[in-house]
Amino acid sequence: MKRVDTSEWPCTIARSAAVLGDHWNLLLIRQACLGMRRFDDFQGELGIGRNMLTIRLNGLVDEGVFRRVEYQNNPPRHEYRLTDKGRAVYPVLAAMAAWGEQWLSGPEGTPIVLHHTACDHDMRAVVVCSECAEPLNVHNVLAIAGPGQRK
Amino acid sequence: MKRVDTSEWPCTIARSAAVLGDHWNLLLIRQACLGMRRFDDFQGELGIGRNMLTIRLNGLVDEGVFRRVEYQNNPPRHEYRLTDKGRAVYPVLAAMAAWGEQWLSGPEGTPIVLHHTACDHDMRAVVVCSECAEPLNVHNVLAIAGPGQRK
DNA sequence: CCCACTGAGTTCCATTTTGCAACCCAATGC
DNA sequence: GCATTGGGTTGCAAAATGGAACTCAGTGGG
């Protein structure tokens, strides 16, 4: 009766969901994207229990999303930093933020505005095709079996 | 000791995570994006327990992601269809698929290839700025308080 | 020297969630 | 009239979750 593990399913969404389909993981990566690195900071900011936090951080380190770095050694202390793989989750968070902004904001409006420093505009994330740069939607994308397919 | 609910936090990612930070929800929406609508089809394809499935589908209907539609009434039978809000999750899934493809594929390569019918190319999703169309990354986006902020 | 504090975790325990299997019900199909 | 189909419940045991208290090593203050 272990929780179902989808990390080996022949589907990139299922595999991603094994890591990203957990609200604490998402929130931890979000905080890390904002520059947070320390155990107690994550704990205090998110209100996650310390035991949960330990389990999540270890899991994300095992996944290669975080790296555990000693930042002083007397007494030994470490912090959790995003790896390249971890930083690559940012676009997913941005897409989730865009969805949340459009569909989950109350009448007061969005609680967070994203500002793109590269072009100096407030913006929202848009998910587009790598080949033609048009926005994607359910109707214009087909999923077909790739080389790693087996099931 | 109920599971922490982040749906009212003043953060669009936390709010989205309350819905999308659950692997079954993600997988159900994925299946629905592929055209699946029936209880038994979801159950059989994903292998999710029937009780879990009931809870998840009801939850997603309450959230407004799915709509429960009667497709015959003798005996009464219904199916679950995506609403506009539900279809709007697709870009998030596409972004997750792109991350999974790059970081979670084994040596055999990706199990799934996405094909953009609009431009007739195989592609991956790219998350860009709505204003300048440049790809986003951790370093060039700032999160600042919006009108709905309070905390 | 003693005490409190900091950072980063453990441990314990009571609730919830999961997952699985078995069961229910109404209308067909054969 | 008996099994099948679609869409669920119910019951139960194994895990995950959340909260609070406790640990441990070094530091800073008095």
Image (spheres, coloured by chain):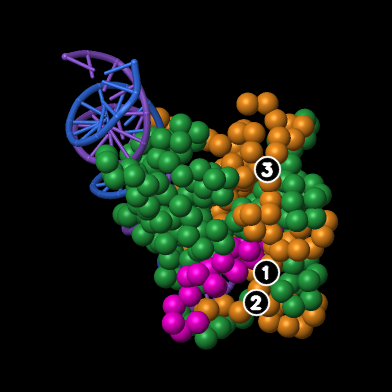
Chain colours: A orange, B green, C blue, D purple
Residue A85, relative to residue B105: is it above or below?
below
Dot placed on the residue nearer the N-terminal end, 1 or 2: 2
Q: What residue lies at 80% left-to-right and 50% top-to-bottom?
A: B120
Q: Which portion, as a residue range, is magenta?
A: A83-109
Quarter of the picture holding the C terminus of chain A: top right
> Disc 3 is attached to a residue of which chain?
A
| Residue drawn at x 77%, y 35% as measured from the top left | B109
Q: Quick check: A15 above or below B47? A: below
Going by the numbered disc 3, the residue's amino acid type is Ala
Q: Amino acid at mark 1?
A: Ala
Which residue is disc 1 drawn over?
A: A125
Position of residue A102 relative to residue D23, above or below, is below
Q: Disc 1: which chain?
A: A
Q: Are marks 2 and 3 on the same chain?
A: yes
Mark closer to the observer (2, 3): 3
Q: Which residue is mark 3?
A: A143
Q: Is residue A107 magenta?
A: yes
Determine contact: label 2, label 3, CB under 8 Å.
no
Along the line of sight, the residue nearer the viewer: A35 or C10:
A35
Residue B6 in view in this figure: yes
Of pointers 3 and 1, the one earlier in the residue sequence: 1
Same chain for the residues under marks 3 and 1 in the image: yes
Could you say which disc has been placed on residue A114 in the image? Answer: 2
Give yes or no for residue A123 being in the magenta stretch.
Answer: no
| Secondary structure predominantly adopted by residues drawn in magenta | helix
